[in-house]
Image (cartoon, rainbow, N blue to C red):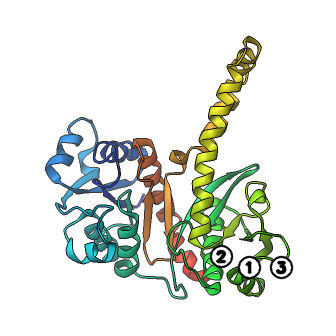
Amino acid sequence: MKEIVVAIDAMGGDNAPVETVKGSVLALEYPGLSVALLGDEKIIGEELAKYKYDASRISVIHAPDEITNNDVPTEAIKAKKNSPIVMGLKMLKSKEVGGFVSAGSTGAVLVGATLMVGRLKGVSRPALATILPGVNGSYVMLDIGANVDAKPEYLVQFAKIGSAYAKHALGIENPRVGLVNVGAEKEKGNALTKEAYPLLEASGLNFIGNVEGRDLPLDVADVVVCDAFVGNVVLKYAEGFGKALMQMLKTELTSSFITKIGALIAKGGFKRLKKRFDYKEVGGAPFLGLTGLVVKAHGSSDAIAYKNAIRQAYEFIQKDIVAKTQELL
């Protein structure tokens, strides 16, 4: 099997480097995977010393600079050239690694990736994508964080790169594409969605029309597109709703002896439901439309979430989705 190397921002996120290093070690269960940990080599070394692992599959690259969420992304990318984000993206650009994963500053990752890694031909604005749970499986939503102000033609590009991702990563042969809107009728929406609708109709994709918020989890589309303002609101609501649903179920199911018995019987089903709503199982959000693979992990990721973000990168590289996306474009 061909070796797959993924660069890891070991210092990014709320729980770094403890959880990032642990997640990287856990990810070594994937055959043929090697990881390059970027950050303070002394601190990373102290964390690695806690585990038994194949040392030939983990390398440590000293990257002493730190980009924080308080830094201005464009300035930080230029000034902090020895940060894990900048060094990891340079390694990706030069093909030293097949992918880069970070739970650090979202702005710095997005700006750095766009400027340093570059866009695929035919893509004006790359987009962050995520996989959300639905009644009959999952669906892809983009953009969730990269382009708050989008143009109609951007939404068409999002639909194309999202369709390539759904086809080659999720195995959906002819993905149904929906446009997030406030009504199902073609005439509904704001200026952006009204102008994007006919462009999507003429795109050659399997465009099924507008999709209202209430229909998103009901298996009406495999790929849904929107600007990042709408996408991020939907994503954060979905995360919060999943947690609230589990809390409400727990309250109701422990309210009496009878419900406790029923909960015990259905315990396996509730565990599976909780897992479907858990962002840690997804791993991260791939930044689609670039010439290389960048995965943005959740800032609060623990080791399991980080392991799954690395798995996501590993599978993305295996399936050569970047090249297949360029073919569709």
In the rendered image, residue 212, in percent from the top left (x then y), is placed at 77, 64
2 and 1 marks in contact (CB < 8 Å): yes
- Residue 185 image-quadrant placement: bottom right
Number of marks in the image? Answer: 3
- Is residue 311 at all visible to an observer of this figure? yes
Q: Is residue 49 left or right of residue 301?
A: left
Mark-to-mark CA distance, 2 and 1: 8 Å
Q: Residue furthest left?
A: 42
- Of badges 1 and 3, the one in the foreground is 3
- Of badges 3 and 2, the one in the foreground is 3
Residue in the image at 44% along x and 42% along y: 304
**Which residue position is annotated with label 1?**
205
**Which residue position is annotated with label 2?**
159
Q: Which is nearer the N-term, disc 2 or disc 1? A: 2
In the rendered image, residue 257, in percent from the top left (x then y), is placed at 73, 11
- Of badges 2 and 1, the one in the foreground is 2
In the rendered image, residue 196, in percent from the top left (x then y), is placed at 71, 83
Q: Which is nearer the N-term, disc 3 or disc 2? A: 2
